[in-house]
Image: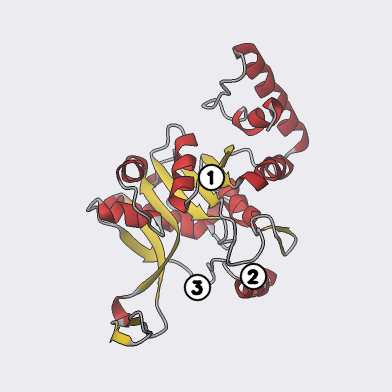
Amino acid sequence: MSKNSKLSLRALHPCHSDPDLSGEESHMAQDKLRVAISRDCFVASAPRNDIKNHQAIPSQTGVVIAAAGVSQRFGTDKAFLPLAGKPLVAWSVDVCQSCELVSQIVIVLNENNLDLGQKVAMERCWSKVVDVCLGGKRRQDSVRQGLSKLKGCDWVIIHDGGRPFLTLELIQEGLEAAQYTGAAVAAVPVKDTVKRGDDNWMVRETLNRQELWAVQTPQVFRFDIITKAHEQISRDVTDDASLVEQMGHKVKLYVGSYANIKITTPEDFALAEVIARNR
């Protein structure tokens, strides 16, 4: 990646500077980008009536959009696959950009999508995006990279780029729920009967459905809690809340949405197209 492309998003935020540039070059680049944004973009704020009691929630909230996977089960890289006319990852970033509770956004991508991610961020006028950065080998490695790019945040929202139907309400309710323990996850009650099986595909037990929740993102954490969890725990996990749980910290559940699907397979994408048409 060239020097110019490396600074394009970092220069948008005063907390970020590029070590490859001199102080004078960095200031000139920042001024140039601010002029471009003011000339080409009109960034609308979220409607006030969409978010209630926002005064009670800390303003310094960052978002990490995790979209660095290789989409192995999908069959092709899906991060920028068009869904109802816009890139898949743009659905969730647009919501975060419009949310008055969010101050910074980091988008984590794989190497093949870095340049495209920066291009889309500029085209869509995502002024809150402070960095588009390279992910790691595992999802948790990618989130850790994203967390390192946020500056001065008290809270962080971690969201899968493959869940396009994030809403302002899910963000607000997650921040409110996280006030109890410093950690909260969106989840929905499991509708199916769930059985535990063995290696021979034989049923070992039937689990109590009344106690089971299908966990989603967004997942909301006090910044110091989630960064400590990522620093201290290296074993593989499938979500960030698992790291916090392994430290012995309590995680609050709050009601998500059955429409908040994660696109993992082509069948998921077909369902997402139906949902998107009704948005």
Q: Is residue 212 left or right of residue 173?
A: left
Mark 2: give few (<14), some (14-19) or many (20+) Cα within 10 Å: many
Q: Amino acid at mark 2?
A: Phe
Which residue matches tag 3? 258
User: Disc 1 and disc 3: Cα gap in Å?
Assistant: 28 Å
| Label placed on residue 269 | 2
| Precedes in sequence: disc 3 or disc 2 | 3
The answer, for residue 74, to whether it is visible in the render is yes
Classify residue 29 as left or right of residue 108: right
In the image, what residue occupies the spot 62% across and 18% down? 21
> Quick one: label 1, few (<14), some, or many (20+) residues within 10 Å?
many
Q: Is residue 77 above or below residue 147?
A: below
Q: Disc 1, disc 3: CB below 8 Å?
A: no
Mark sitting earlier along the chain (1/3): 1
Question: Residue 63, how many percent across, how many down?
Answer: 49, 46
Find numbered disc 2 in the image and state the secondary structure of the residue it sits on.
helix
Q: Secondary structure at mark 1?
A: loop
Numbered label attached to residue 190: none
